[in-house]
Image (cartoon, rainbow, N blue to C red):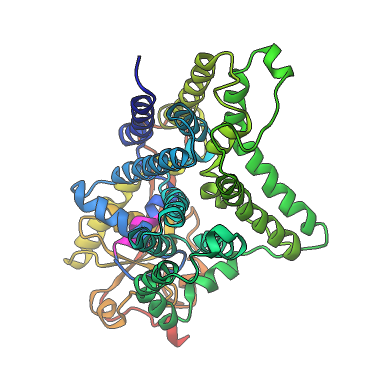
Amino acid sequence: MMSAERSALAYGITICLLWALIPSLFFPNPPLDVVEGFAWGREMALGYTKHPPMQAWLLELSFHLTGGKAYGAYWLSGISIGLGYLAIWHLARRLGLSARQAFWAIVLTSVTFYFTLPAPEFNPNILQIPVWAGMILFFHRALEKGRLIDWVILGLLAAFGLYTKYFVALLIGAIGLYALVFPSARRHVMTPGPWLAAVVCLLAFAPHLAWLAKTDFITFQYAASRSHGAAGWIDHFYNPVNFLGAQIANHAGLFLVVLAGFSLASLKKIRLKLPAPKLENRSDSLFLLWFAFLPLGVVLLASAVTGNEFKQMWGTPMFVLSGILAVCAFRVPVDWSSPKRAFITAALIQAIFLGVITGQALLEPLWKKKLSRIHYPGRETALFLSDEWQKETGTPLAYVAGEMWPAAHLTLFAPSRPSMFLNHDPIESPWIDAEDIQKKGVLLVWTGDGTEMPQMFRHLYPTATRQGFKSFHAPGSGTMRPVTLNWIIVPPGKVADAGSD
């Protein structure tokens, strides 16, 4: 019989491999956030309009490691989730759970929604999974052992998290508050460790802070422009309840696996218990409950007070402790009558979700009419438009302006990998060199069947007209509606100055 350690390793590797392999083999085109991330990463800037740069940097690295392919994004997701499982395993063992319980903590975590269907879309939410799990693990190590190396790693992970998404500040705040509230942690405050972690984090994050100041905090401006404030008093109630409901639904797979492990007779006797056996240390119990529920509580309170809507997917990294918590609360697998049935249920849930993404890739073109992101003919459009530019100007395409979706595909698939001049706006694209784009010209591109240019171009090029258009079909699609791309080639010396308007 395989040991719990080997079972956990085999399960984690198998699941991560499947979630990386299937989209690598069957997705004709990358998902939305992946394409956008590749477009940002092309520039290797210290920041971007929408997010901090870490996701984009890693995508650009994967592009070069795979010889210019996009499938590296799926493997980045698999690696991120796999590292999350590794941190969960070590944290479970540190909290006193047996190897068998730690194995089930990983299984139960793996069937929560955010670890399944969203996995192929490597974005800052997915990348936060190992950051949150790792920070909680090394904070626990630092509190127990007090070693400076653990505090240094915690500081580096915090900086990495901030480079990934500012949302990790919520976890940093939870860690800081924990260190002030609980005496077992407060004794560390007057030691060098926490201060060293803070200094390491600030030093590592300083380049991005300088970029934010230089760009007038453009990322925060974007976030403010996308936030949905309260439209009325009902939003102060509806938005937090809606967010909480979505997070509970996210755990449906976990609940199904837990229930599958019990017999009908044992269900009648079920008792929730925190801490579970083996979690005999009260400090560890408080530690687990604090980081399992405090971040969620803060988000719900903020939403209730402000009435703002929090995106449901923001909850992705907040529940890395759900599997450990479930093992403790439901005495898994101690009180189970059928662990085998529970594991079969977990495997079926994974198979269903993996079947869904396989079906999306292979079967959607047979019946779906609306062109989906993963069936967008990205490579075909990029090669065609870059060829049109080359024939017209005799030079490689260096810049493309317009809507993010069609423009970003050129940055990824065109041979010259042009820079994206998002919405022809220098504020949204601070990496654009005004002199260089004037020397090399720009391709304007937008989607739609009409001849009229979008507003973003019309006020900059009032006398210009659509130069060409072409419809592109999804690869192998018989029912999906084609996408029509329109373009204008703006030659060198004729690029409008958006900043002068």
Q: Quadrant of residue 486?
A: bottom left
Is residue 128 visible to us here?
Answer: yes
Q: Nearer the viewer, residue 485 or 414?
A: 414
Figure label count: 0
Q: Quadrant of residue 99?
A: top left
Is residue 230 visible to us here?
Answer: no
> x and y percent of residue 459 in the render?
49, 77
Q: Which residues are magenta?
A: 36-42
Q: Residue at x 16, y 66 (%)?
A: 394
Q: Nearer the viewer, residue 3 or 216?
A: 3
Q: Nearer the viewer, residue 326 or 445?
A: 326
Q: Residue at x 42, y 57 (%)?
A: 142
Asked if 296 appears above or below 341 in the picture, the reply is: below
> x and y percent of residue 400 in the render?
33, 65
Q: Tell me the quadrant of the picture where the N terminus can be found.
A: top left
Left or right, residue 179 beside residue 39: right
Left or right, residue 153 beside residue 173: left
**Dominant secondary-structure state across the stretch colored magenta:** helix
Left or right, residue 334 beside residue 270: left
Asked if 173 appears above or below 284 in the picture, the reply is: below
Q: Residue at x 20, y 55 (%)?
A: 415
Asked if 306 appears above or below 479 in the picture, the reply is: below
Q: Quadrant of residue 229?
A: bottom right
Q: Is residue 37 magenta?
A: yes
Q: Is residue 41 magenta?
A: yes
> x and y percent of residue 262 in the render?
62, 17
